[in-house]
Amino acid sequence: MQTLAKSKSEPSFLDAITGPGEVKKLKPAQLVELAREIRQEIIFNLNKTGGHLASNLGVVEITLALHHVFETPKDCILWDVGHQAYIHKMLTGRRNKFSTLRQYQGLSGFISPQESEHDAFVAGHSSTSVSLAVGMAIAKDHLKEQRKIIALIGDGGLTGGMALEALNHLGHIQKNVLIILNDNDMSISENVGGYSQYMKRIKETYFYKDIKKKIDWIEDKLDMVPLDPKLMNLITSVKQVAKDKLENPGIVFEKLGINYSGPIDGHDVEAVINALNKVKDLEAPHILHLITRKGKGFTPAEEDSIKYHGVKAHSLEPTLKEKIEAKDPDSNINKGLTYSHVFTDALIECAELEPNMVAITPATAEGSGLVKFGKAYPERFFDVAICEQHAVTMAAGMAKMGLKPVVSIYSTFLQRALDQVIHDVAIMNLPVIFGIDRGGLVEDGETHQGQFDLAFLRSIPNFTVLAPKDAIELRQMVYSALRNLNGPVAIRFPREKAEDGYLENGIACDFKEIDYKSWQVLKQGKSNKVILACGAMIAPALQAANELDAKINDGVTVINARSIKPLDTKMLQALANEYKDNLHLLTIEEGTSSGGFGSAVLEWASECENRVRVSVMGLPDRFIQHGDRNLLLQEVGLTRKAIVEKLS
Amino acid sequence: MQTLAKSKSEPSFLDAITGPGEVKKLKPAQLVELAREIRQEIIFNLNKTGGHLASNLGVVEITLALHHVFETPKDCILWDVGHQAYIHKMLTGRRNKFSTLRQYQGLSGFISPQESEHDAFVAGHSSTSVSLAVGMAIAKDHLKEQRKIIALIGDGGLTGGMALEALNHLGHIQKNVLIILNDNDMSISENVGGYSQYMKRIKETYFYKDIKKKIDWIEDKLDMVPLDPKLMNLITSVKQVAKDKLENPGIVFEKLGINYSGPIDGHDVEAVINALNKVKDLEAPHILHLITRKGKGFTPAEEDSIKYHGVKAHSLEPTLKEKIEAKDPDSNINKGLTYSHVFTDALIECAELEPNMVAITPATAEGSGLVKFGKAYPERFFDVAICEQHAVTMAAGMAKMGLKPVVSIYSTFLQRALDQVIHDVAIMNLPVIFGIDRGGLVEDGETHQGQFDLAFLRSIPNFTVLAPKDAIELRQMVYSALRNLNGPVAIRFPREKAEDGYLENGIACDFKEIDYKSWQVLKQGKSNKVILACGAMIAPALQAANELDAKINDGVTVINARSIKPLDTKMLQALANEYKDNLHLLTIEEGTSSGGFGSAVLEWASECENRVRVSVMGLPDRFIQHGDRNLLLQEVGLTRKAIVEKLS
């Protein structure tokens, strides 16, 4: 780290930045130097804290240009997703807190109005910024305020349905919104069409071939005709206009009623500033198309690394890069073998046994580990971009035709497709498997906490909702579900390391069909106290039960309630019969207590002839901050200790 | 009805249609006659049963052409929304059941695979057909089946985010899907941009002005140059190609990688058949753009009514039209004053008191009665097209800037925006009011039953979820919520007539602030039995309680649990204290019992120091068919009678 440390002691523009106002004073050349310092500091910091490296290195110049031209908080900058706002945070008074990034009670890894008035709106999920901008532009006009509303969105985010809904509406109402399209080819898996794809495809369309053929023909003819140079230039310029328009996505936006300029180099800070100044006073909606590169200024492969004085740094990069990427929230490297990996590996092995099984992901192939499946079975793998609604309904169409689609999706992203799950999958009771990753608490914070999935899924008819207690059970659930698929099955697992014992000499256990709708007694006690725990809560439940053996005569029973829906009512009734009116159930889930697994057990108990006492432990009815998952579990009281207290 | 009755006794092509195969045998001229007969029969039938008149009259020729060219069920026709498939039903063996349309246990008003193998997939909500088609096309290729997948979608449906997600993906994977764009200007409120809007807007864009200016300039110059006619023609044709492409939406689709043909007249059956034959064997994705008119062949205003032998019919139309529209499910005329009207009228009156209140609807201005608000306050009314996600997040942006947005949305359509409700509204606890119409059971069937809203909304932090017992309470809730708005408030009401007593000499009662988070004792009993009812279940609860007075000593108490979230725990605790360990609560809601209001009360009871017995009445854990709401309520056991039995 020596070199980086040394670089920090050099005279620094960054040190002089106390607020966004300072950025305005700098000349382009100075901004280029500032950009270099920022990149070094980001790399330096993320090496300690971890975080989204590549996406932030990609927007250094854009962020500087935005703060050079606009004035937050008066002007509103809406960062789509919001994980690329580190530089914005550094420039708006949060640089000194940077060492606490993504730590419990530290700086959020996403945009957060609670942190700063310069953060215009909360963000975390993709494709919301244009809708927010439209709403804010309408509001400022209604309130007669003078502000500029700027929505920054990536080419990946633009594939999201709601972003397209917003563009269509914006084009219609013609409000004063500036959209910055941050176009880098890496925001979605390479096998998915982002806007850049159009430029390749357009050459294949009728229109292009047709008009090009005819223009060429005319040219040949005109060569034979004496025309004054001025006219020839004009014809050339007409062709250029047409060509430019055809080869960038501009016309799509102009069709929508949104004027377009670009594409320009998003890493040329002076060019971006000039482009922003050109459009900043327009009253009509405008989209400025910037081409950027994720990880800009970091990888040795970067063609302009020298310009960034990276030479010395490069010697550090191999190890440094590894370290930082190891902490990238979208990477699982630091987590060793995760549930995501176990899920993907099971799919790959099952693919051989189930020729009609296909896998679908809405742009989370990396995070969910599904990339590996895509390599093994490219023709049976579908990354549909950031399109959760389409992913689910497409899967329903596949299932209706006889395939066995598996939708791999994060818990909070599934919220984007509730209607499709109900309307297109559940009503016809179609055989679709949902592999729900990131179920429960994660370090990312409010927007990413998988706290609602159990509650909303269990109220949907025809659904089976499962939560495996460990990696082996996850593996067997995937296999068993595929073997006996006759309706929708959701398998929900945490963003966690799969505990040891899963692999033996690097090989996972054999597939075995399990009756996952039946619960399992993991620890038999003789007292009236029975713990019904699901998923990741099994471990603390067992620890607590063992600790309680000393305190409670005859000990506590622990049951693996692996099926949240349906409940194992046979086992429940047997317990009720055994303990007469004296049964005390404690349900534990890493999901909201409002309508979740616990309330399902309460519903059963309310119908039970015997009196059954039910206590519910789960996530509270509030949003939960970011930070280490274990700290969060302590905060909400889902720990061995809390369970012991509850039953003591 | 004389004329129509008579027309039915004439020799009929329709009578000869036993299945779609028969349609193939007919010549264009005969199909024109068949179309006339179909329109008469539809008008004749809908006059009895009610139903979607206009949208079905608009697709008569398209439906005939589709069955003339393709072969269902081998080929799959996916009807977006599915309420325009009456003709399809008539041609596929369901004509004889037509008198049962939309009746309990009769023909569904929507597409329904349970009814016929010719219905490829369930439909009810908009914008799903392209996603389904992509999934089915992938499946048929994987299974090596020879079928054609056809997605029919309207210009309104195409504004829905998921349809755009699907187009983008289809353009990328280049699967064999034929999209029929049924472009009529009426599918969404006139003040919203559909695809037709682009054709108007495009003329205002840089590109168009720019290239047009230059082309004109060249022309002038070329006039001065002697060019052979062949070349002049070619130049003209190039201009034509460019002009055509610029003035229809084709290039947008071609940019997406989907080839385009059209627009053509969707009421010229021969032209449609020829167009379909041209594209039916293409392997690449293709979109065929048809221009149609809703209500075609019915309104006197129709320019080609004579061609449809409508003259005699026209004499009947004024009354006939009224009758049929009175039964159109999207109309409230037959329901007199509805909750929807009461809600809208309250908004209009509040708009004067709350200058920063604005109203938003996702293309349901007519059904929700909000059209009236739009006329009263055009600059404060926003119909965003079929874009539920955008509607909610736009509202969040407005609220963040200081407005008081009211989102008027149907219960099942809100399922489209769950993530936006959580991520953009609830996390920041923003003051947005949701007027949730069609809460509970409706006559439309599975896809439209508002059975999940209470369950998923009450598990979202920061939300207040209300259900008024009558029109007056709805009115006061709207007023009170706007007056004290400091977070999201959902007001959920049924698709029902507002009971009498709401208006006095046509004037509604004065606004009065109510503390809607507190429940109300409507009937005080002295027994330990207490009914907690919400919304439309209050009425049967009171009837049951009165009937029970004879059977139960000291009578039953009935409480208006108007706040589903938060619960009135003060009142609940008071009851628990009063009856010690002998309290018996019966909760009644017109929503799913799995995670709904009843389970919220169970959760409270599980924490209560006293023993409280809770019984839950609500909708069962299954989907519910179409038919008269009262018949459906009997089917699911939400009636006075059922309540009496439960407590006897």
Image (spheres, coloured by chain):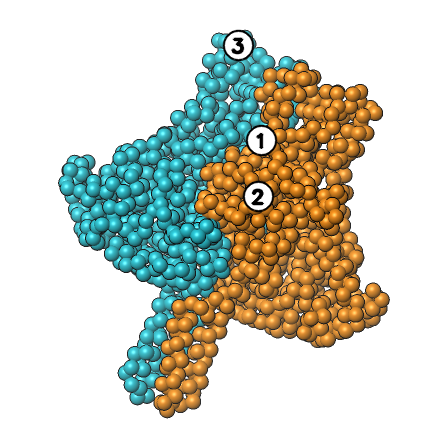
Chain colours: A orange, B cyan
**Residue A553 appears in which quarter of the rendering?**
top right
Query: Which chain is indicated by disc 2?
Result: A
Residue A562 appears in which quarter of the rendering? Answer: top right
Q: Which mark identifies residue A625?
A: none
Sequence order check: which comes first, mark 1 or mark 2?
2
Provide the residue designation for mark 1.
Answer: A566
Tag 1 and tag 2, C-beta contact below 8 Å? no
Q: Which mark is residue A434?
A: 2
Q: Is residue B358 left or right of residue B84?
A: right
Q: Nearer the viewer, residue B395 or A603?
A: A603
x and y percent of residue A48 in the render? 79, 57
Q: Amino acid at mark 2?
A: Phe
Amino acid carrying mark 1 in the image: Pro
Q: Is residue B336 visible?
A: no
User: Quick check: can you spot residue A279?
Assistant: yes
- Amino acid type of the residue tagged 3 in the rendering: Ile
Q: Which residue: 55% across, 9% down? A: B554
Return the residue at label 3. Answer: B552
The lab-note entry on whether marks 3 and 2 share a chain reads no
Q: Is residue A601 above or below residue A299?
A: above
Marks 1/3 same chain: no
